[in-house]
Amino acid sequence: MASRCSTAPCITTVELYEALKTGLISMDSTMRSNLGVGLPIDVLVVRTGTSARPTSIIASKPASPITTTCARAWSAALRAAHQNIPRPPYKLEKNGKP
């Protein structure tokens, strides 16, 4: 990701596939926290400088490789992050209260 932020507004450029990956991760997290959101996910790509004509369309359905790969990798990354965060710095007393 490149960033040119010497003055406002900040302009950031992101590679297309990184943006797609971030969007899929966001949708995976949203589906886990909101049962009203689910598959399929339709993604429409319109490249800069085109006349708003889509250059590609991705439809991820349940059990599709793009959906399952992203969900599994994101779950594993979240588990690893959770395990790497230190325990809170307090101890519980014998009665179970801090």
Image (cartoon, rainbow, N blue to C red):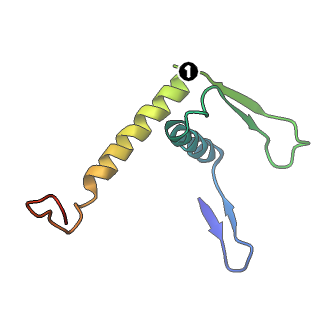
Q: Is residue 26 above or below residue 53?
A: below
Q: Is residue 52 above or below residue 62?
A: below
Where does residue 3 sit, x and y in percent of width and height?
63, 67
Q: Residues within 10 Å of mark 1 (few under 14, many from 20)?
A: few
Left-right relation of 17 to 83: right
Q: Is residue 19 above or below residue 6?
A: above
Depth check: 10 or 89 in front? 89
Task: Name the residue rendered at 11%, 59% in the picture.
Answer: 95
Q: Secondary structure at mark 1?
A: loop
User: Outermost residue toward the left?
Assistant: 94
Depth check: 15 or 87 in front? 87
User: Outermost residue toward the top?
Assistant: 63
> On the image, which quarter does residue 1 sit in?
bottom right
Q: Which residue in the structure is indicated by mark 1? A: 62
Which amino acid, by three-letter code, is at mark 1?
Pro
Where does residue 79 sit, x and y in percent of width and height?
32, 44
Task: Name the residue rendered at 39%, 38% in the picture.
Answer: 75
Depth check: 78 or 88 in front? 88
Task: Name the residue rendered at 75%, 38% in the picture.
Answer: 45
Task: Name the residue rendered at 53%, 28% in the picture.
Answer: 67
